[in-house]
Amino acid sequence: MRSIGLKLSASAFALLLGSTAVVQAEQNPLRNAYFGETHMHTMFSLDAYIGDNRQTPDMAYRFAKGEAFDIGGVTKQLKRPLDFAAVTDHAEYIGEMYSTIIEGAPGHDNPDLVTLRSLESLEQKQEWFYNYVLKNARENPTPTHPSFYAGPSTVKSAWQIMVETAEQHNEPGVFTAMVGFEWSGAPGGANLHRNILFRDANVPAAPISYIDVNTEEELWDWMRVQEAEGQQLLAISHNSNASKGRMFPNTDSSGEPLTLDYARTRRHYEPLVEMMQIKGNSEVHRKFWAADEFSDFENADSIQDNSGRKFHARDFVRGGLKVGLQKGQELGVNPFQFGFVGGTDSHNGLMSDVAEDTFIGGHGPEDGTVERRRTAGVGGWIDGKDLSIGSISGGWAIENTRAAIWDAMRRRETFATSGPRIKVRMFGGVDLSANPSDPSAMVEQGYLLGVPMGGELPQAGVAPTFTVYAEKDADGANLDRIQIIKGWVDLNGDANETIIDVIWSGDRKIDATGKLAPVGNTVDLTTAMFTNDIGAATLIGSWTDDNFDPTEGAFYYARALEIPTPRWTTYDAVRNNLPLLDDVPAVIQERAWGSPIWYQP
Amino acid sequence: MIVRIIKEPLVHFLLIGGLIFAAFSLFDDSPTNPNSRKIIIGEADLASLSARFESVWKRSPQPEEMQTMTEDLIRERVLVNAALDLGMDRGDAVIERRLRQKMEFFAASIAEAVEPEDGEMEAFYQANAEDYQTPLQLALEQIYLGERVSPEDSSAALAALMSGADPAQLRQASMLPERFEMTAMRVLDNSFGTGFAASLINFPIGEWAGPVRSGYGQHLVRLSAKSASTLPPLDQVMPKVLSDWQRTKRQDVMDQYYQTLRQGYEIVLPTTDDAS
């Protein structure tokens, strides 16, 4: 029996050898789009644990790869597995969570942790969190470890679990599991959080937290030390919308004006910004961008009701890009030259669970029921109905490996979408042919004669042309249009912007006021269904910047919009036979944002 | 789930686990009988008090501090004993959840110590073969005809291809790859939309066929090869098999442990009359 089994194995082995060569997709020099999650919390984040998250990092990666899990009585499974993912638990309290979770770990039997493990009601949980975390954070200018902290060995042990789990799940060519963590700096309630992602498993013995270093400058100093030791890492800032003017500031954390050194440092360590996540879209806000007809999209206004997080124009990504141009003119280097990625920041271990039609909340019991999503919210942060589900990251890379995806992030050849797997691509250069019709030829020429998204145009005396292409989600809604958003700073140092409709579906015309007619709407609000009878599957086009002035710094980024589809609140209402909510839109136009191309004189 | 036969080693472990548990109860000096009128504070208790103090204050406790903590421990034991006498633990969700957790942790720690027997991995791997199979793969060429194409136009394109027309003359420009080497169906679906690959399974090899609908429109497809799904040898997928086996084993041990305990109880449920 046994020998027959062996023979069978041997022939299976031969078959596999024969097929491995083709299973391993070849590198594509024109690059493929890969989709993934760059912001996910598991039970190793204290706030997630309090919210009943019992998903381990291992389970989070398995979910990303397509496995089904039961969460709060609902079976969740991605319709399409992800290409890459990173677990990014809060570095703060990660050691305390190790003590809490692992039986026999130092500090496991501490009475406060025994209580933590036994909390029942939402009120008890909120009270415990207030007493041990929030109170501490509010009463101390810099946070400290709680009394149940059992020492740095617990931080290392927790980190080791993160690293080993990512190692186990990383399958070059099939699935990329990145090692990462979140540094959760929040001075005075201003959200300055950053996610740190590593290129490989060459990582430090422990992550660094807001308890260890209290300013972003010190975080970069720490990153510099890691780099000197041969590690490759980058930071992604997120929720600039809740940063109280401090994510893209005029001064450093000590109140001094930005310096050339600040600009160089930040630009090097923070090549990316998280455009959107469950706590809102940070691109623009309708209040500051009334002229942008698509700015009223997941504005998450109720964030302003908490911790004094009032919005400013500079808190938004487009505002930050403009401040960056101004600083670039002043200092010679643009500190805020970042590309776009997207994440969920969900605290339930469900990687890129961004489908509007199956939203179950992202914060355990806080937003885990239809009632709480409609009438309550996530304590200290946002109203349930303002949640946006979150977004997804895209990257153009030659293959699906850690190195290739991380390198795409490093050179900012990335994009973010509000959930659907829309692919968007842009090239810029003075020699690009206008009005492309073949996307493959457009891409080849783009790499040959121009720069891809995330890049910088070389010095030029003539107007650059931008070629753009967008492809709908193969399982999703059609596309409405592609726009290019140009921002520039004039010689007086004033920042300006303009939005160009580059290419659109159907035979619509731009009217006398410069507006393109809306694409239409096929959504049936009684059934939450839509059709693809309007819009286009793909769009391709170009735009030449005839107002280009070689003495003015500028950025250009593409935004591709879908036709209207139901918002998650509409699916919630239809599924539960409830009326639609008055104060949130019933339909939305999902979108993709491609990283900018810059010009610096 | 596959119904698994209870293997001897598992039973052994449960027995050992039970013995360890019994031994704990024997040697543990904390009161096992809630009605006991004697409270014994041992050296181990004092050492643990001292260690807990040190972890917070980073120094050893003074004698008077030790005295206070000991008094407090006695107070706790007295009150706990009295509470147990009064049955205050019953029906308290927090206490019950904690006790349940302790039992589950205990069973899990036994499970973690279990090593696979000879041949056990092989058997597990065979029994769950579908989890380890390399997925079915297709190699193909495709022509994108466009988003909205009439049946007449697609038939005409297909006829032209069959009579030897150059595919390049018929296709619409697109970023979708024109040719796929052996590619898993899931990867094809990622490019073309869910269900696309499945609709090609019965296509003839080496002949143009279609039209096939993708998320982008109509396509004509020529399959060049189709691989059966194959089972790689165990050593190639050992890490995954091992981790799956451990996960399954842990659940099995916990279930078995629970079942063993449960057999010691008579479970009385309300009859239909009581419930109504």
Image: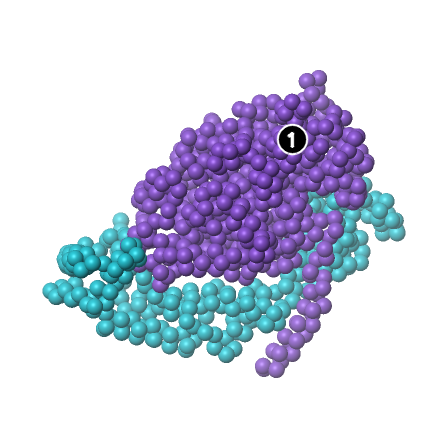
Chain colours: A purple, B cyan
Answer left or right for B13 relative to A264: left
Report the quarter where the C terminus of chain A lies. top right
Say which of A307 and A192 sits in front: A192
Q: Residue at x 66, y 37 (%)?
A: A596
Outermost residue, left side: B37
Answer left or right for B265 relative to A249: left
Q: Which residue is mark 1?
A: A329
Report the quarter where the N terminus of chain A lies. bottom right
Say which of B6 and A307 sits in front: A307
Q: Chain of mark 1?
A: A
- SS at badge 1: helix
- Other-residue count near label 1 (Cα within 10 Å), few / some / many at <14 / 14–19 / ≥20: some
Outermost residue, top side: A512
Q: Residue at x 72, y 23 (%)?
A: A509
Looking at the picture, how far across and down is residue B275, in whole percent?
A: 26, 51
Q: Is residue A58 visible?
A: no
Looking at the picture, how far across and down is residue B162, in whole percent?
A: 85, 52
B184 vs A451: above or below: below
Looking at the picture, how far across and down is residue A109, in whole percent?
A: 31, 59
